[in-house]
Image (cartoon, coloured by chain):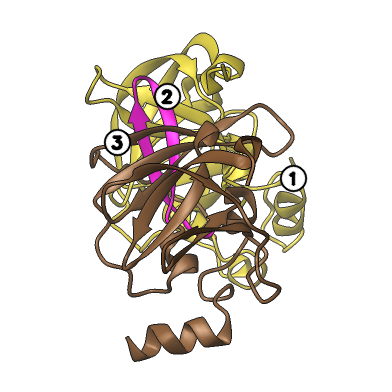
C-alpha cells in the first residue's frame, strides 16, 4: 500500500495570519511579519523603481524610514486591480499594496506546496492553508514576506538616490 | 504471451483517443470537483482540488496529448506521481469514464513521444501508456509529432 501523500507533509502550527486579496485572489501572510495595516495615504511615486524593478511603483515615508511599495498584483502576475490597503512589513523596508484586508485567522496546519509546482510560486509561497470547514475549504497560499523584495533588490533600489533605508 | 507479462491498466479517454496508466498508479476516478486556483508559473497546472483534506494539483495533460482543442473534461483521474521522493497525488482531467483492462504492453514505436512508455493493443485500437512524470515536463504543443499535429488540425 502506498503511503498517503499528506503523511510526509503538513506541518502543524497555530500562527496568526492576515487574509488579504489582490484582485480576485486570496492570500495569507503571517501576522507577525506585518507591522501595520493602513490606507494608501502618503505614498509617493517612485520613478527610479520602474526600470529595474517594475513591481515597486511607490515609496512610503513612515517614522523616518522609507518603505518600497510593492504591488501584490504585479508580484503575482495578476491583472491590475484597485488598491486600497497597505501592509507595512516588520523588519523589512517593504509595504505591500493589496486590494482588501479580509480578516485575521489562524493557520493550524500548513500544507507544503505540491512538488509539481516548480515555478516562481516556490519562492512566493511558504505553503498552502485550508480555510473554512470541510467539504467547502478554500485553498489559500501563505506568502513569504521576503519574496516581495529580495535583499539585493532592496539594496539596488536604496542606491537609486531615494534616501531609503538600507535593509 | 505469458500470464506474467499481462498487467492491469486504467484506460482513460481524452477526446477520441484513449491512453493508459498502470493501475497501481491510479487512486480513483473522481467526479467533477471545485477547481481552486492561485497564481503560479508552472505549465499545464490549472489549479488544485481538495480531496478528503488533501491538496491535489490538477495537471491538464490533454493539451500535450491531443492539442488545444480537447473537449470538455468531465472527471478527474487521481493518480500518483513520484519523482524520487515521496509519492504525490495528481489529478488528471479526462473527458469520459475510465476502464480497467488487462493487457500485455509492447514497446513504443520509435517515433513516439518520450512520455510514451509502451503500447497496448485492443483490436484495431492502439492505446499509448504514458509516463505522467515525463508528460508533465512537456510544454503544451511541443510533444505532438508532426503527423499527429496534422491529424489534429484536419480533425
**Relative side of A141 to A82, left or right:** right
Q: CA distance from mark 2 to mark 3?
A: 14 Å
Q: Secondary structure at mark 2?
A: strand
Which residue is disc 1 drawn over? A151
Q: In this orientation, which residue lies closer to the viewer: B21 or A146?
A: B21
Residue A31 got which mark? none
Q: Chain of mark 3?
A: B
Mark 2 vs mark 1, foreground winner is: 2
Q: In this orientation, which residue lies closer to the viewer: A13 or B17?
A: B17
Q: Chain of mark 1?
A: A
Residue A27: where, in percent of width, then height?
40, 37
User: Residue at 70% of width from left, 47% of height from top?
Assistant: A150
Which residue is disc 2 drawn over? B54
Q: Is residue A20 within the magenta segment?
A: no
Residue A154: where, in percent of width, then height?
70, 50
Q: CA distance from mark 3 to mark 1?
A: 44 Å
User: Residue at 74% of width from left, 35% of height from top?
Assistant: B84
Chain for colour yellow: A
Q: Total of numbered circles in the picture?
A: 3
Which residue is disc 3 drawn over? B30
Q: Answer few, some or many: residues within 10 Å of disc 2's Cα (few below 14, many 20 plus, some between 14 and 19).
A: some
Q: Is residue B57 within the magenta segment?
A: yes
Looking at the image, can residue B8 be seen?
yes
Q: Which residues are magenta?
A: B42-60
Are circles 2 and 3 on residues that touch, CB within 8 Å? no
Q: Which is nearer the N-term, disc 2 or disc 3?
A: 3
Amino acid at each position: 500500500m502506498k503511503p498517503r501523500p499528506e503523511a510526509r507533509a503538513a506541518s502543524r502550527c497555530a500562527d496568526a495570519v492576515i487574509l488579504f486579496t489582490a484582485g480576485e485572489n486570496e492570500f495569507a501572510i503571517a501576522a507577525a511579519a506585518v507591522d501595520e495595516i493602513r490606507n494608501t495615504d502618503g505614498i509617493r511615486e517612485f520613478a527610479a523603481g520602474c526600470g529595474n524593478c517594475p513591481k515597486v511603483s511607490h515609496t512610503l515615508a513612515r517614522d523616518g524610514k522609507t518603505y518600497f511599495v510593492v504591488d501584490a498584483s504585479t508580484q503575482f502576475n495578476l491583472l491590475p486591480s484597485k488598491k486600497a490597503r497597505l501592509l507595512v512589513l516588520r523588519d523589512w523596508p517593504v509595504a505591500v499594496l493589496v486590494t482588501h484586508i479580509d480578516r485575521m485567522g489562524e493557520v493550524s496546519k500548513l500544507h507544503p506546496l505540491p512538488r509539481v509546482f516548480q515555478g516562481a510560486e516556490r519562492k512566493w509561497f511558504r505553503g498552502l492553508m485550508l480555510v473554512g470547514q470541510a467539504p467547502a475549504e478554500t485553498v489559500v497560499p501563505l506568502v513569504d514576506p521576503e519574496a516581495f523584495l529580495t535583499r539585493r533588490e532592496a539594496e539596488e533600489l536604496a542606491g537609486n538616490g531615494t534616501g531609503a533605508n538600507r535593509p | 504471451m505469458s500470464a506474467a507479462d499481462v498487467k492491469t491498466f486504467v484506460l482513460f479517454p481524452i477526446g477520441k483517443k484513449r491512453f493508459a496508466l498502470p493501475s497501481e498508479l491510479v487512486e480513483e476516478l473522481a467526479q467533477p470537483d471545485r477547481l481552486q486556483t492561485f497564481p503560479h508559473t508552472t505549465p499545464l497546472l490549472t489549479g488544485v482540488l481538495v480531496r478528503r483534506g488533501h491538496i491535489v494539483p490538477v495537471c491538464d495533460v490533454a493539451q500535450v496529448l491531443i492539442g488545444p482543442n480537447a473537449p470538455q473534461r468531465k472527471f478527474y483521474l487521481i493518480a500518483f506521481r513520484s519523482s524520487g521522493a515521496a509519492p504525490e497525488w495528481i489529478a488528471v482531467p479526462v473527458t469520459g469514464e475510465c476502464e480497467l483492462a488487462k493487457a500485455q504492453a509492447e514497446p513504443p514505436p520509435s517515433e513516439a513521444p518520450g512520455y510514451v512508455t509502451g503500447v497496448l493493443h485492443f483490436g484495431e485500437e492502439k492505446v499509448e501508456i504514458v509516463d505522467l512524470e515525463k508528460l508533465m515536463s512537456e510544454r503544451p504543443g511541443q510533444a505532438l509529432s508532426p503527423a499527429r499535429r496534422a491529424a489534429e488540425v484536419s480533425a
